Image (cartoon, rainbow, N blue to C red):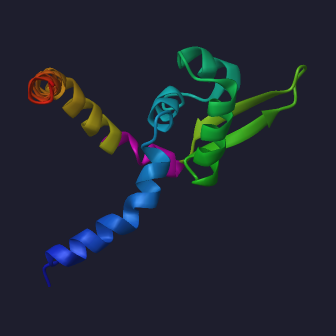
Amino acid sequence: MPKTQDTVIVEAVATRPILEQIANKWSVLILTVVCSEPARFNAIKRRLEGITHKALTEALRRLERNGLVSRRVITSSPIAVEYSLTALGHSLREPFSALYAWAVQHQGEVQTAQVAFDQHKLANYKD
């Protein structure tokens, strides 16, 4: 039986908490860093300009809690922690690649729309 518009909306709303977890400011970028190979905390931090220690820690914990990355303690001297994608995390590669390709393809259009909106808003709200 085909889904009704109401069913689709209910399902979309139900996925919101998950989407908020994986599509926030840093998660997609962190997943991109550990996509091809495991990485240590400081290596991830160096690759993500502007992320704070606290923000990276919180994002990695959230990704680990959601089953997208795994954390492995390396008992060397000094002790290190390495993060890698889980099978569930790897399953995001295709949708993220599609989203990235869309963003690259339409970046100019989005920027043009933003400029047009800002100019229209500025022209209509002058006192």
> What quarter of the picture does the N terminus occupy?
bottom left
The part of the chain drawn in magenta is: 87-94
**Residue 59: x and y, percent?**
60, 39
Compared to residue 69, the image places residue 49 above or below, namely above
Q: Is residue 53 left or right of residue 32?
A: right
**Residue 50: x and y, percent?**
54, 18
**Residue 65: x and y, percent?**
63, 53
Residue pictured at 13% horizontal, 79% vertical: 2
Report the residue that reaches farthest toward the front. Answer: 127
Q: Total of numbered circles in the picture?
A: 0
Of 83 and 104, the residue lying toward us: 104
Residue 90 within the segment the image draws in magenta: yes
The image quadrant that residue 71 belongs to is top right
The image quadrant that residue 3 belongs to is bottom left
Residue 70 within the segment the image draws in magenta: no
Residue pictured at 28% horizontal, 31% vertical: 100
